[in-house]
Image (cartoon, rainbow, N blue to C red):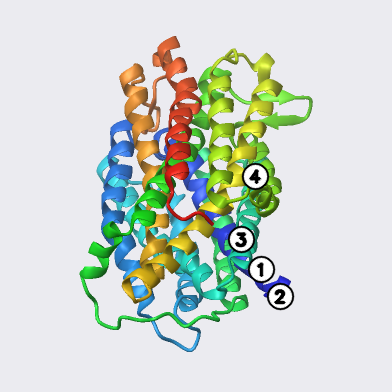
Amino acid sequence: MAKLSEKIGYALGDAAAGGIAWKIMSIAFPFFFTNVFGLSLADTALLMLIARLFDVVTDPLMGSIADRTQSKWGTYRPWLILGAIPYGLVFALLFYTPEFGPVGKRIYAYALYLLMMVLYTAVNVPYGSLLGVMSEDSNDRNQFSSYRMVGAYAMGFITLISFPYLQKMIGGSDQHQYAVLGAGFGILAAVMTLLCGLLTKERIQPKRTEKFEFKQFIDLFKNKPWVYITLTGICTNFFNGFRYAVAAYLIDYCLGGDVTMGSFIINYTVLMAFGEVTCMIFGGVSPAFTKWVGSKRMAFVWSAVICFVLSVAFFFIPQDPAYIWLIVAVVILTSVGIGFYSPLLWSMYADVADYATEKFGASSTGLIFSSGTMAQKFGGAISGSLIAILLGVAGATMIADEMGNETIDPASITESVKTMVWALFSLFPALCALVMGWLAYRFPIKK
């Protein structure tokens, strides 16, 4: 039985990755790139699409490399220990807006974003793979996975709820605010990642295939549980990706800007922070919910049903700030389902890795978990890319501000654009929830 300090240490890894880096990248980047940094909708969409095609290569390659790593710190931990500082540094640089022309800015954004994806992969694929070598016991893995999700959502809540108040405290231009916040959160992410690597232990020695073989990639597609869990993972990240990436537009365009209730500010980060704290609570009770339902598979199915029903219901809420507490309530209730399924997903990946070792005779834990990271980035960025494209289809256009930066023209925010934003937060995620529920129901491992 692992010590509490180790469980907390493991939770710090996703507090840094999911609660800081990925949370801010998912919810702030589409808005930051188009409304602060100065990229066009087309450039933002293309950047995220290129990054995802890039990840198709880097994620499985990183998984394969991690599986073959041998060091005094083990197989997967050295990547967290050595990668922590570069990871935090590049994250900070991504939020800096250089005084370049349009071409220079485009090059800067593309280079830094792709480098960030490489570093995120180099740290997060080994981090996810740790779950497969810290314990063989399924209940232990559920506990570690639950702590991981609590860490991610607790830090996500802190990040999102504090964001607007920190911006106000920093003051100055939007570019200055984002640059300072990027530096602060980058340092915090680096420290948490380093502590995760130092506090965790690898107890299981993987069955290595020292020589690189293309056969292991072919074996993935012969692994039926892997196919189902990967498709499910992509759907969960499309579900989250649509909601987080469009939240800023929803507040700005559909509700007319930040909603102030007395001294309390509800902006896009605060709105989603309500969901984060709900996910933290229900992620913590996910193992108990799974025992009550009877299996991980059926617990996932019921979680998807919750997400589907509440997402459809959201679409019918009037686009009016007077309904802000109803909007918050539905976001909270939807997050109950997200909180239940989030720990299950990674625990099911560990089960798939065990199945692969039994079936094919060698460990491919890193490679299996790399598909989870790839699904996360694919779902998050493609949904962000689709949002930029669909807003353009609905009628949103770009103009240059007084500084020459490209930004969305307020005059182009018509009712059709607002309806598209509302649907991207509700109906599009509902469809994703429906598909992921069906995939989870068909998942072959019945634990």
Q: Label 3 belongs to which residue?
A: 142
Residue lying furthest right: 262
Q: Label 4 belongs to which residue?
A: 279
Q: Count the labels in the image.
A: 4
Residue type at tag 2: Lys
The answer to which image quadrant residue 242 occupies is top left
Task: Report, in whole angstroms, how far the alpha carbon at label 1 lies from the one at label 2.
Answer: 7 Å
Q: Position of residue 422 (x, y in %)?
A: 49, 21
Q: Earlier in the sequence, mark 4 or mark 2?
A: 2
Residue lying furthest top: 415
Q: Position of residue 54 (x, y in %)?
A: 27, 54
Q: Position of residue 16 (x, y in %)?
A: 56, 59
Give the left or right position of residue 372, taking residue 327 as reference.
left
Residue 349 visible (yes or no) = yes
Q: Label 2 belongs to which residue?
A: 3
The answer to which image quadrant residue 264 occupies is top right
Q: Label 1 belongs to which residue?
A: 7
Task: Report, in whole angstroms, how far the alpha carbon at label 3 lies from the one at label 2.
Answer: 15 Å
Residue at 33 percent of width and 55 percent of height: 114
**Is residue 166 positioned above or below 87 on the image?**
above
Q: Position of residue 73 (x, y in %)?
A: 50, 84
Name the quarter where the C terminus is drawn. Answer: bottom right
Name the quarter where the N terminus is drawn. Answer: bottom right
Q: Earlier in the sequence, mark 3 or mark 2?
A: 2
